Image: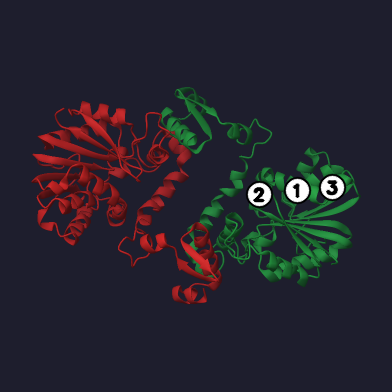
Chain colours: A green, B red
Amino acid sequence: MEQIAERVKASPRGVRILSDYLAILGFLKKENESYSLTADAALFLSKHSRAYMGTIAEFLANERHYENFRKLTEAVRRGGTAGEKGHNMAPDDELWVKFARSMAPLTIPATLFIAQLEGAAEGRPWRVLDIAAGHGMYGITIAQQNPQAHITAVDWPAVLEVARENAEKAGVASRYETRPGSAFEADLGDGYDLVLLTNIFYHFDKPTCVRLMQRVHQALKPTGKAITLEFVPDEDRISPPTAAGFSLLMLAGTDAGDAYTFSEYDGMFQNAGFGRTTFHPIPEMPQQLLVSEKTG
Amino acid sequence: MEQIAERVKASPRGVRILSDYLAILGFLKKENESYSLTADAALFLSKHSRAYMGTIAEFLANERHYENFRKLTEAVRRGGTAGEKGHNMAPDDELWVKFARSMAPLTIPATLFIAQLEGAAEGRPWRVLDIAAGHGMYGITIAQQNPQAHITAVDWPAVLEVARENAEKAGVASRYETRPGSAFEADLGDGYDLVLLTNIFYHFDKPTCVRLMQRVHQALKPTGKAITLEFVPDEDRISPPTAAGFSLLMLAGTDAGDAYTFSEYDGMFQNAGFGRTTFHPIPEMPQQLLVSEKTG
């Protein structure tokens, strides 16, 4: 413990109390007054591990979320965030760069699930549009799994820089194209086989979701599909807990966002012109996947 | 839900999302789009219930605690709070009035345990000193259980007003005396059978604890006992979780406070002149009780 304190330039007392607390939480193992990483901590919380996911704290524990929850009472009164109106749609918001730089580790189970569900490994020539791509990992993983896939990513310019870096690291940069701008205004192109809509609808009210999905409909080729990754609670809106509880985060932080149920999504997507939508829970993840066919 | 929204003058959307979240947490039951209190919520969280304990949020969720934890990294470096030095010993700190006004409901299991352990119901003429009495409920409960008990409460003047109100409500005001001032400086009197030290030592370093206990030793009569209610972790300092984890709260919020182990308390109390100290876990509560005999 004295060694740790010296190493991190902190007081032995502070390090002792913090280390004990981390042991209580299960991140450290304490034996004979010495501390070591537990297996999970070594895998996911050591910066030396390739599976390091500590970056997600930079987004999930961002001060803005605290601010929003400090004003939760006011948000309940208003029915929307008590923070700045429309702040989560502002161009080039620094928060989305932070999102892109920090949240990639959480995507792995869902990206692989999507790639497998759509049969990426079969290697058909795909044109994939990744809307509000962020770190880009959803599209990039498909490009890795399908060497015949070409990805077009849409997001704010500063965010797309992160996606491009990630595409380069993943060795798929030659099949990676970017279109800077808002998903509601940018020229999306057309003739896509797949459009990825990951963690985007929950920020908006229903008319806005429909408007976005109409643009997606236009961008798809007739046999194309829209792939939506979202927190989709059951119709009772109180289960499963994480998906249902996500509503509160959207009440606190957005003007009119929500965790919509399957029937709500199905209705919105039909209004936007889509045919059949199917529901796919992702194992071990709080999110669910919706696959919508352009023509039913 | 529309009815609730109208009643509390909030948006139906905000009320729907908040109510669903409370249902997810188990505070509400949701059936056919209508909400009702669960049994626990009706008992402990309705202001119409005599067992209402919602007041504790005013202390436990106080902004000052958030402030302290926002500066936790700095506290670990320093080995003590990154807030104002010594702030938790300032005379007439408004926070302790808030404590006195809000935290009484949490005391019930421990107060009854103490009264029973010491045989209050036997009705011997007791003189009881309640140090840093706060709401006064520890002494007041003993006065209720033992009609021959006379209580002397020490705390800051504004805090003692709350204790006095509670003594009046409990019908023991005629046997309730107050001595305003710091536990370290006020004239405590002497010849006490019992001295109550509830939730006080954890705020201080060991020399300060010894100094306080020396004053307690002087105030007791030869057959008297000191009763200490504290978070006392096992010698490993990482179990049980709540008692052990309390250290972090003290690191974040005090200059040098801690959750001391039994051997540490026993050592400090011996240094202050006490004989045998015995350890008593309180069922269903995170705190533990230490009973120390003035003469071993």
Whichever of labels 2 and 1 marks the residue nearer the N terminus, that label is 1
Mark 2 packing: few (<14 Cα in 10 Å), some, or many (20+)? some
**Looking at the picture, which amino acid does disc 1 mark?**
Phe
Whichever of labels 3 and 1 marks the residue nearer the N terminus, that label is 1
Mark 3 packing: few (<14 Cα in 10 Å), some, or many (20+)? many
Residue B7 at x, y percent in the picture: 44, 76
* Side of A20 where B103 appears, left or right: left
* Side of B221 where A58 appears, left or right: right
Q: Mark 1 points at which residue?
A: A113
Q: Is mark 3 on a helix, strand or loop?
A: helix
In the picture as drawn, the residue positioned furthest to the right comes out as A125
Give me the chain letter of mark 3: A
Closer to the camera in the image, A193 or A40: A40
Residue A62 at x, y percent in the picture: 57, 49
| Badge number at residue A120 | 3
Give me the chain letter of mark 2: A
Indicate the quadrant where residue B130 lies: top left
**Looking at the picture, which amino acid does disc 3 mark?**
Ala
- Asked if disc 2 and disc 3 are in contact, CB closer than 8 Å, the reply is no
Closer to the camera in the image, B246 or B119: B119
* Side of A128 where A111 appears, left or right: left
Q: What element carries label 2?
A: loop
Q: Is mark 1 on a helix, strand or loop?
A: helix
Q: Mark 2 points at which residue?
A: A285
Q: Is residue A27 above or below residue A235?
A: above
* Side of A211 where B136 appears, left or right: left
Give me the chain letter of mark 1: A
